[in-house]
Amino acid sequence: MMMSEPDDLQAGLMGGFIILVVAGIIECLFLHARTMVTYEKLEAVEAVLVRIEASLDPQ
């Protein structure tokens, strides 16, 4: 019976570690998705600025 206590502790620690790793991966995926949206917005703003610059160019 004494041998089961360290095994239970180790199983609990491993379970907690796995939960933390999965939560970290999910958080990184959400952060990546938000970053991609930001890049798309920046590209749209850049396209507008290029058009404005082209219209202001006297050539």
Image (cartoon, helix red, strand yellow):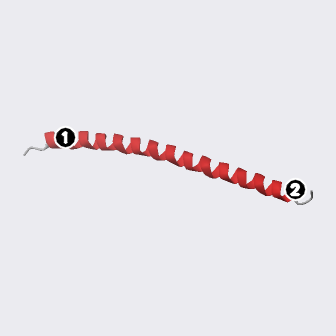
Name of the residue lying farthest toward the left? 59
Q: Earlier in the sequence, mark 2 or mark 1?
A: 2
Quarter holding residue 43: top left
Of residue 17 and residue 44, the one placed in the foreground of this image is: 17
| Residue 15, percent from left and from top | 71, 51
Left-right relation of 56 to 11: left
Q: Where is residue 1 in the image (x, y as percent from the top left)?
A: 92, 56
Q: Distance between the residues labelled 2 and 1?
A: 69 Å
Q: In which quarter of the image is residue 40?
A: top left
| Residue at left offset 50%, top offset 46% | 29
Identify which residue, 13 or 58, lies in the foreground: 13
Left/right placement of residue 5 relative to residue 46 reads right
Label 2 crowd (10 A; few <14 / some 14-19 / many >=20)? few
Q: Name the residue under label 2.
A: 5
Q: Mark 1 points at which residue?
A: 51
Residue at 78% x, 57% y: name it: 10
Residue name at image x 88 percent, y 60 percent: 3
Answer left or right for 23 relative to 47.
Answer: right
